[in-house]
C-alpha cells in the first residue's frame, strides 16, 4: 500500500530534550516536506526537500532541522524543543513531474504527529 | 509571492443543502490547483485537482473549475451529507522551480442531520 508513515503519532516531552520525528514514504517520491498545523494559522511549511541531500527552508524553519540521506526518509529534528513548538506536524511527499520547469504534483500526507512540549 | 485565500469558516449547513466554498489565488504563470480535505483526527487527503485553465476537477460529488480569468477555484457540492463534515483546504502548486505548495487557511464545514 502506497503511504507516508510518521512516528511517533503522539509525543509529550519537556523543554530542551532533543527529539526526532521520523517520516518515510514508499512511493519513490523525490519531493518531501514538513508542515505544522496550528489553530487559526492553517498549514505552514517548515522544511522541504527536492531530492536526496537537497533541503531548503520553508516559511517557519526556526528551531527545526531536517536531513535527507535516503530518498524514502525525511526526519524532522528538534534540537531543543520549546513550548511554542507544541503543534500537529505533517509530513508529505510527491513526485516532481518531468517536463515541467518546476512545481510538484499531488502531495500525499502522513497521519500526523501531535507534539506537546511542556 | 504566491497565496491562496479561502472564505472564512465555520460553515454550517443542513443535510442535502448546496455547498460553495470560495477560493481565490495569486500566482505567476500556470499553477496547479487542489482541494484537500481533513476529516477529524486524520491527515489531509486529496479531494480533487485541476492542472490547467478551464479544467474541472471532481470527486465524491464535489466539483471545482479552474478559472484563470477570475483566479478562482471554488468548491461546490449539490447535496452535502453529514459525512462531509471536515476541514477543506484550497492549495496551489506553482510551476516555477523551487517554489512550493501554498495552502489556504482551511474552511471548517459542519453538516447537521
Image (cartoon, coloured by chain):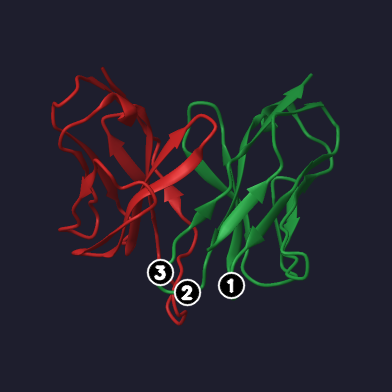
**Chain letter belonging to callout 3:** A
| Residue B44 percent across, percent down from the top left | 50, 41
- Distance, label 2 to label 3, CA atoms, is 12 Å
Q: Is residue B5 visible?
A: yes
Q: Are marks 1 and 2 on the same chain?
A: yes
Q: Could you tell me which residue is drawn at 29 percent across and 24 percent down?
A: A83
- Distance, label 1 to label 2, CA atoms, is 9 Å
Q: Nearer the viewer, mark 1 or mark 2?
A: 1
Q: Could you tell me which residue is drawn at 58 percent across and 42 percent down?
A: B105
Name the foreground residue: A52 vs B92.
B92
A75 relative to B94, above or below: above
| Label 1, residues with CA under 10 Å away: few <14, some 14-19, many ≥20 | few
Q: Are marks 1 and 2 in contact (CB under 8 Å)?
A: yes
Q: Which residue is mark 2?
A: B96
Q: Could you tell me which residue is drawn at 35 percent across and 52 percent down?
A: A33
Name the foreground residue: B43 vs B92.
B92
| Residue A100 percent across, percent down from the top left | 47, 79
Q: Which residue is mark 1?
A: B28
- Distance, label 1 to label 3, CA atoms, is 19 Å
Work out which quarter of the rendered image holds the C terminus of chain B and state it: top right
**Chain letter belonging to callout 1:** B
Q: Which residue is mark 3?
A: A96
Indicate the colour of chain A: red
Indicate the colour of chain B: green
Amino acid at each position: 500500500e502506497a503511504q507516508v508513515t510518521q512516528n511517533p503519532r503522539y509525543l509529550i516531552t519537556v523543554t530542551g530534550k532533543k527529539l526526532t520525528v521520523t517520516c518515510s514514504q514508499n512511493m519513490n517520491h523525490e519531493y518531501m516536506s514538513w508542515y505544522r498545523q496550528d489553530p487559526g494559522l492553517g498549514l505552514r511549511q517548515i522544511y522541504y526537500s527536492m531530492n536526496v541531500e537537497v533541503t531548503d527552508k520553508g516559511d517557519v524553519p526556526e528551531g527545526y532541522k531536517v536531513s535527507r540521506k535516503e530518498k524514502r526518509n525525511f526526519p524532522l529534528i528538534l534540537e531543543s524543543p520549546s513550548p511554542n513548538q507544541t503543534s500537529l506536524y505533517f509530513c508529505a511527499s510527491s513526485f516532481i513531474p518531468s517536463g515541467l520547469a518546476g512545481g510538484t504534483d499531488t502531495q500525499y500526507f502522513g497521519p500526523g504527529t501531535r507534539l506537546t512540549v511542556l | 509571492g504566491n497565496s491562496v485565500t479561502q472564505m472564512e469558516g465555520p460553515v454550517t449547513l443542513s443535510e442535502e443543502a448546496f455547498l460553495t466554498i470560495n477560493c481565490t489565488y495569486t500566482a505567476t504563470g500556470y499553477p496547479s490547483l487542489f482541494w484537500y480535505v481533513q476529516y477529524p483526527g486524520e491527515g489531509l487527503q486529496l479531494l480533487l485537482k485541476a492542472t490547467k485553465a478551464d479544467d474541472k476537477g471532481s470527486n465524491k460529488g464535489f466539483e471545482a473549475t479552474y478559472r484563470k480569468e477570475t483566479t478562482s477555484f471554488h468548491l461546490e457540492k449539490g447535496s452535502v451529507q453529514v459525512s462531509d463534515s471536515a476541514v477543506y483546504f484550497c492549495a496551489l502548486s506553482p510551476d516555477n522551480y523551487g517554489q512550493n505548495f501554498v495552502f489556504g487557511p482551511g474552511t471548517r464545514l459542519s453538516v447537521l442531520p
